[in-house]
Amino acid sequence: MTMSVVMYKRLGVANTDIAFYTSWLSLPWVLKPLWSPWVDMTRTKRFWIVAMQGAVAAGLALAALSLLTGFFFQLSLFLFLMMAFASATHDIAADGFYMMGLSRHEQAWWVGLRNTFYRVAMTFGGGWLVVLAGHLEKTSGSIPGAWSMTVFTAAGVFLLFSLWHGFILPRPAQDGPVGTDRGLRSEFFAAFGSFFKKPGVWLALAFILFYRLDEAQVSKIIPLFLLDARGKGGLGLTTGNWGLVYGLWAVPALTCGGLAGGFLAAKYGLKKMIPIMAGAMYLPKLAFIFLSLAQPRNFGVICGAVAAEQFGYGFGFTAFMLYLLYFSDGPHRTAHYAICTGFMALGLMIPGLWSGQLAAGLGYPHFFIWVLCSAAPGFIIALSLKVDRQFGRKGGHVSGG
């Protein structure tokens, strides 16, 4: 999803089409609660993790071939969508594996590092692989060929990870199909029913849907803004420079933000840190207002602004993931966490569908101003959440139900 925005831009697809159609790639994460009980009840979580990594590797290899066809946009989008279903299934299993393998305090302590590696993976896809694509564009002289080779490289990386995890992942004794006397349909309705009976569920859903409203709108537009010509309001970066911004500067900033968020949440608890984390998530969007108004030519200034935004995002996103862990705790926690992340994906997908048209209509400066203003509901809801003051702290009790 990250790399495809830049790839389609370089392959000549219109900005509005890129934002609209790539936003649909979030759909499997919206729908994944529908089959999360099935994943729990059929095989081990370890099996699903390894198998779905192999499926994504196969999908990437086919997508690489599709880029050499005359109908690459439709075919590659279809393959990316199939990969997204495999990735969403992987998420269900990996989240359950994480919660099964760590104590409640350890979940809070390590969530910053977990988020960091999640974002590093996205930055690798949208950063270093883009640098590779930019280099291959210059050396090969063929943009479709360069991106095909780049996606093949990603397929090879995924295949190696799948093989590696097949050997290295632990085999916990408690990792097995979840036995139930009620059957799949009854288990599904039991999981959904108990989720919507949780205290404060509607406030929690509002938080999940609105906390990342700003990111949902800018995530598709920022790459287009950085790559668009200056005459169109962008910064005119090359493919390689765009990759360097995210691959060289964003990763360390994101890492520091995620680690700092996890450390402080484990020390002071989520309740005390929510206002600070929410502010840190939203205020750095000022960096893009500055970039769109000033259109600086200094590459270091551009990198610094992106790094500041990424640090704030990494720090503030920790609160979001911790709250999902908190609210999902209890019976059916794997299914409940999948439901939470499904609503999270819905909150990202719907604003992404209109973001391209909105940016085209407002222009980049006014669009980024609007995005910052749209963060107000998420900030207000975050301050209204009821969270155990000890949650996240060592020895603190965790209960989301």
Image: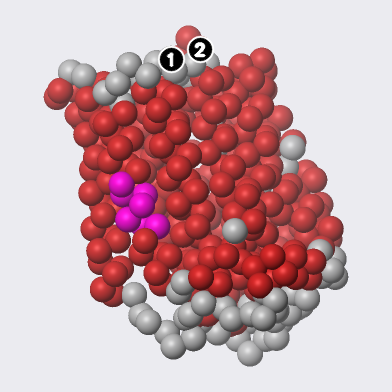
Image coords of residue 75 (percent x, y): 40, 28
Q: Is residue 262 visible?
A: no
Distance from Cα at disc 2 to Cα at disc 1: 5 Å
Q: Nearer the viewer, residue 366 or 360?
A: 360
Q: Nearer the viewer, residue 85 or 24?
A: 85
Q: Which residues are magenta?
A: 52-58
Image coords of residue 199 (percent x, y): 85, 70
What's the amino acid at mark 2? Lys
Q: Nearer the viewer, residue 154 or 59?
A: 59
In the rendered image, the vertical position of residue 13 relative to residue 269, given as above or below:
above
Residue placed at 30% from the left, 61% from the top? 162
Asked whether the beta carbons under mark 2 and mark 1 sit within 8 Å of each other, the answer is yes
Image coords of residue 204 (percent x, y): 78, 60
Image coords of residue 179 (percent x, y): 59, 81
Secondary structure of the residue carrying numbered label 2: helix
Q: Is residue 392 a member of the stretch shown in magenta? A: no
In the drawing, does residue 293 fall left or right of residue 396? left
In the rendered image, the vertical position of residue 351 relative to residue 182, given as above or below:
above
Q: Which residue is mark 2?
A: 232
In the rendered image, the vertical position of residue 29 relative to residue 339, given as above or below:
above
What's the amino acid at mark 1? Ala
Q: Which residue is mark 1?
A: 229
